[in-house]
Amino acid sequence: MSALSMSEVILAVIIGTLAAIVYSLRVLILLERRVANMEMHIQGMARHVLSDEKKILNAVSRKRSPAKRKPAKRATKRRKR
């Protein structure tokens, strides 16, 4: 078996370093996609909560404003025969 020359060792280290960089970038891209997916889900939940809050505020404001209510009907008097 022949021993590796200095240039072959340096070339192997460079190739190994490049492979590690490519793998790290691949992992980084996968994590970024996961984070983006989580952000989309959080935005959807926030939108849902906001619509629920609007419904609640509308219901509360309808209960508090008496001016918007219809006036109650008066009872009619019966005629005597």
Image (cartoon, grey):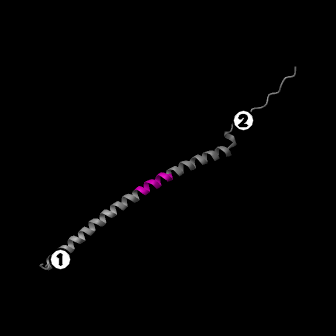
Residue indicated by mark 1: 9
The amino acid beneath tag 2 is: Pro
Secondary structure under the numbered disc 2 in the rendered image: loop
Q: Is residue 59 above or below residue 21?
A: above
Q: Residue placed at 69% from the left, 36% from the top?
A: 70
Residue indicated by mark 2: 71
- Give the CA distance from mark 1 to mark 2: 94 Å
Secondary structure under the numbered disc 1 in the rendered image: helix
The amino acid beneath tag 1 is: Val
Quick check: 65 left or right of 74? left
* Region rendered in magenta: 37-46
Magenta portion: prevailing SS class: helix
In-front residue for pair 44/72: 44
Task: Tell me residue 64's x, y (percent).
Answer: 68, 46
Question: Which quarter shows the N terminus?
Answer: bottom left
Q: Residue placed at 17% from the left, 73% from the top?
A: 11
Task: Tell me residue 58's x, y (percent).
Answer: 60, 45
How crowded pointer 1 is (Cα within 10 Å; few <14, some 14-19, many 20+) is rated as few
Quick check: 3 left or right of 27? left
| Mark whose residue sits in front, 1 or 2 | 1
